Amino acid sequence: PRKVDHALSGFDKSLRQYGPLMPLAIFGARFLIDVLDNMTSSSSTRRRRRDLYVSNFISLLVYVAITALRVVVYLLLRRQNVDVFSDHILLGSSMYAMTVTEAVILLERGPKANADSTLNIAITAIRRRLLGGVFVFGGLLCGDMFFTARYFHKVQDTLIATITGLLVFQLPCATWTVLRA
C-alpha cells in the first residue's frame, strides 16, 4: 500500500491498531454510567437493575457478533481471493454501526426528569460529555473512511465495502435499535 499523509493519519494509525476495541470503550463507559445512575436512583428496583444488566449484556452480545461477523467476512473474502474490497472501509462501517447505536442509547437514557440531586446532575453531565465524544468519534470515523476511500482504494472497492457494511452491520443495528425502543 502506498504511503499518504492526510489530516487524519494519526487517527488512522490508532484505528488500525485498536479499532475494534474503540466502540467497546464507549460501551464500557456508558455501562459504568448506567450502573452509577442505577445505584444512586431512589426508584431503583430489583427488576430495573436486572433489566439494565440484561439490556447491556444484549448490547455487548450484538457488538461481539458484529466483530465476529466482520472477521468471518474478511476470512471468506481472503479465502476466495477477492481483491476488490476495502477491508478498512468495512471495519469503519462496523465501528460506525456500534457508535451510532451507543449514541441512540445515550440519547434514550438522557437527562432524568427528577435530576434534582447533585449526583444526578453530575451523571447527566457525564452522559452528555460521553455523547459529545461519541459524535466526535463518529465524525473522525467518517473522515478517516473518506481519506481511505480517496487515497487507497478504487471506487469499486469502496462501493462494495460500503454496501456490504450497510447491509451487514448498519441496517441490522438500526433495526435492533428501533425494535428495542
Image: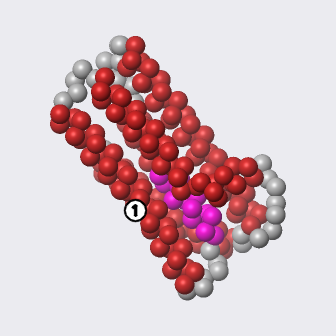
Residue 130, compared with residue 86, is above or below; it is above
The residue located at (35%, 56%) in the rendering is 61
Residue 65 placement: quadrant: bottom left
Q: Which residue lies furthest to the top in this view?
A: 117
Viewport quadrant of the N terminus: bottom right
Which contiguous range is marked in magenta? 86-99
Lateral position of residue 130 relative to residue 121, left or right: right
Q: Which amino acid does label 1 sit on?
A: Ala
The residue located at (47%, 62%) in the rendering is 67
Q: Where is residue 6 in the image (x, y as percent from the top left)?
A: 79, 53
The residue located at (43%, 38%) in the rendering is 30
| Colour pattern of the rendering | secondary structure
Lateral position of residue 73 relative to residue 137, left or right: left
Helix, strand or loop status at disc 1: helix
Q: Where is residue 59 in the image (x, y as percent from the top left)?
A: 36, 50
Lateral position of residue 146 relative to residue 171, left or right: right
Residue 42 visible somewhere in the drawing: yes
- Near-viewer residue (36 or 143): 36
**Residue placed under numbered mark 1 in the picture:** 65
